[in-house]
Image (cartoon, rainbow, N blue to C red):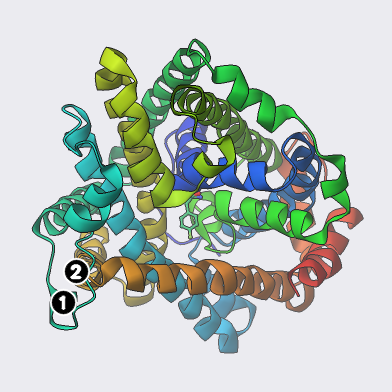
Amino acid sequence: MANSNQSEWDSNIAFILAMIGSAVGLGNIWRFPNVLYSHGGGSFMIPYIVSLFLLGISFVLVEYAVGYRFKSSLIKVLYSVKSKLEPVAWFIALIVFLITTYYICVVGWDLIYVVLSFTKAWGSNPDLFFSSIVLQSTDSIEGLLHIVPMVFISVLALWAVAWYIIQKDLNDGIGKVSKLLLPLLLIIVVTIVLFSLTLPGASIGYTQIFTPDWSALTDLNVWLAAFGQIVFSLSLGMSIALTYASYLPEGSKLTDNALIVAFSNSGFEIFNSIGIFSILGFMTLNTGIPFDQLVTEGTGLAFVVFPKVFNIMGPWATIIGPLFFLCILFAGVTSVMALLEVVCYSISEKFNFSRRKSATIVCIIGFIVSVIFTTSAGSMILGIFDAFLNNIALLFAVLLECIIFGWIYNFDNLIETLNNNSNIKVGKVWKNVIKFILPICIC
Ligand code: PFF
């Protein structure tokens, strides 16, 4: 089944760092704190940990076992399982491609803020600055197609960087960048969190997250939110894990790797949220703005609330501000690499294109689609794309993979693949989770 032109990771650590990079992204930094806060605070950890094991790790193991066994992209895998299933793989590749086109635009907004943060160039009204200068939102129909030059340039720059990384050999590109950015990301996050704990008012923030609301545990929505966070945060259903695992050399310990990646990803988001909450506690103490009004998510948190915080932070803001936006940038870039690799690998394998050729085609078309999001109507269209792709299409992709590998493919082969090499063995429970529990939870 192995593909003779197959790239291979030069070390297990390259694989682990690339996998952690694919998972750690915007979702960890600006989605998790809000989900945690609004779903029971400390008690959210219970559904979160249950979802991590039952759904997250179980599903990642399927993708690892399949990628490692077939040594090819999802396209070829599904074709081998049943040729009629190939369109399902292309459907998933299309979702991944579309997500990349807008995800890169959000990272582009962040790149602008990296530059602005050195001088706090967003001024005294970050709200207005974000909507009228960065997004240039407008109500006029003629104005909607106006391209915002600075967003266009930063998106173009990111596509060029992404192309440069992806067209290189696996280890020279994704491998090297992951080995550089992941340690940097860790240093930045540790610096921000330690600094945030010294701020007056920090305890207003971090005590709130660790104060449990036990009644939340009986609320089904809390369990669904935990499930949703794990799907988003571990980038499930996008065949990233399958693609990266297909580059693993013989003898790799799949289960051990999956546990390291999943724990690192969750550890990152929990640790990072201590920093976010401490900083928001500082803001509450200094401005009197109620804490729950500050705990927003996404762009509102990063590009409106945080610039406001940096405006009152004093001289430290010129260090912590750029570090905060760099953190989002590095986390975003490593996720973009993984998303793109899925699409490029599918195309190069199917059409027998070189890595460079498929990267060039995908990046040019991707950039053209991304231009839509750099217009004044961009953030509105992006919101619609995001709601559909993340809430519906991703879950649907996870469901399809569970059905295909749990029911159509002989699942015992996957158990054998995992147990052959790993210290931790899996068995019937895992099979039942994939065949029954996961599909039921999704439906
Ligand atoms: N897991 C990454 C994040 O949390 O941002 C990457 C990612 C997840 C990208 C989901 C895109 C996506 F739809």
Q: Percent from the top left, x then y, of residue 3?
A: 46, 62
Considering the numbered disc 1 on the image, is that residue within a helix, a strand or a loop? helix
CA gap, disc 2 and disc 1: 5 Å
Q: Which of the two residues, 223 or 187, is positioned nearer the viewer here?
A: 223
Considering the numbered disc 2 on the image, is that residue within a helix, a strand or a loop? loop
Q: Percent from the top left, x then y, of residue 399?
A: 68, 72
401 relative to 83 in the view: left or right: right
Q: Residue furthest front?
A: 288
Q: In the image, is residue 411 above or below residue 169?
A: below
- The kind of residue tagged 2 is Thr
Counting labels gives 2
Res 24 visible? no
Q: Which of the two residues, 119 or 65, is positioned nearer the viewer here?
A: 119
Q: Residue furthest bottom?
A: 84
Q: In the image, is residue 124 above or below residue 271?
A: below
Disc assigned to residue 101? none
Q: Which residue is located at x 73 percent, y 75 percent?
A: 403
**Residue marked by disc 1:** 145
**Image quadrant in which you'd find residue 250:** top right
Q: Which residue is located at x 59 percent, y 53 percent?
A: 68
Figure quadrant of the N terminus: bottom right
243 relative to 398 in the view: left or right: left
Label 1 CB, ligand 1: below 8 Å? no
Res 56 visible? yes
Q: Percent from the top left, x then y, of residue 256?
A: 69, 35
Q: Which residue is located at x 57 percent, y 86 percent?
A: 83
- The kind of residue tagged 1 is Leu
Figure quadrant of the C terminus: bottom right
Q: Percent from the top left, x then y, of residue 326?
A: 31, 33
Q: Earlier in the sequence, mark 2 or mark 1?
A: 1
**Residue marked by disc 2:** 375
Residues marked 2 and 1 touching at CB (< 8 Å): yes
